[in-house]
Amino acid sequence: MEVVWAADGPLTGRAVVDELTRGRPVAYTTVLTVMDRLAGKGILTRQRHGRAHTYQAARSRAAYTADLMASVLDSSHDHPAVLLHFVEQIPPDQAEALRAALDTVRDRPARTSDPA
């Protein structure tokens, strides 16, 4: 996923393998299998281009990470305690960023539902 998120656009499996082999040897078939599974889970999108496929992240790294954080929070029965422990362990600059994000959400106009 790091290679895909760092790319400017869609990548072939070969391009991902080439990038990964810069750091360590990897098997082409293993990388393609993982990419196909990630596409099946909706984490990557896959498009056919001739005989090959190109892959792209379905969501940004930030959106994916936020989904993971929400999933972990949802796994707890005591959300306030989890949030408190989380906030107590993050550095002050990240706490400020969290405060700014909460202020942004709070200041947004309320959504109105469309009567159907």
Image: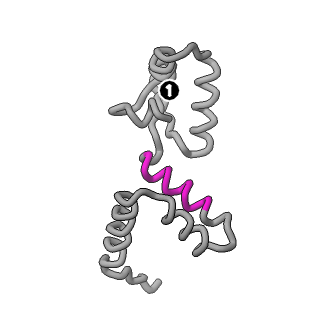
Q: Provide the major secondary structure of the magenta segment.
A: helix
- Left or right? Give the position of 38 relative to 58: right
63 magenta-colored: yes
Residue located at (51% from left, 23% from top): 13
Is 67 situated above or below 47?
Answer: below
Most extreme residue toward the bottom is 115
Looking at the picture, tell me which residue is in the foreground, 11 or 105.
Answer: 105
Is 97 situated above or below 50?
Answer: below
Query: Would you identify the image quadrant in which residue 106 lies?
Result: bottom left
Answer few, some or many: residues within 10 Å of disc 1's Cα (few below 14, many 20 plus, some between 14 and 19).
some
Residue located at (59% from left, 16% from top): 26
Q: Amino acid at mark 1?
A: His
Residue 41 in picture, x, y percent from top left = 61, 44
Query: Would you identify the image quadrant in which residue 37 lies?
Result: top right
Looking at the picture, tell me which residue is in the foreground, 100 or 105.
Answer: 100
The region drawn magenta spans: 61-72
| Count of labels in the image | 1
Residue located at (42% from left, 37% from top): 5
Q: Which residue is mark 1?
A: 53
62 magenta-colored: yes
- Left or right? Give the position of 115 relative to 77: left
Residue 69 in picture, x, y percent from top left = 54, 58
Residue 78 in picture, x, y percent from top left = 65, 74
Disc 1, SS:
strand
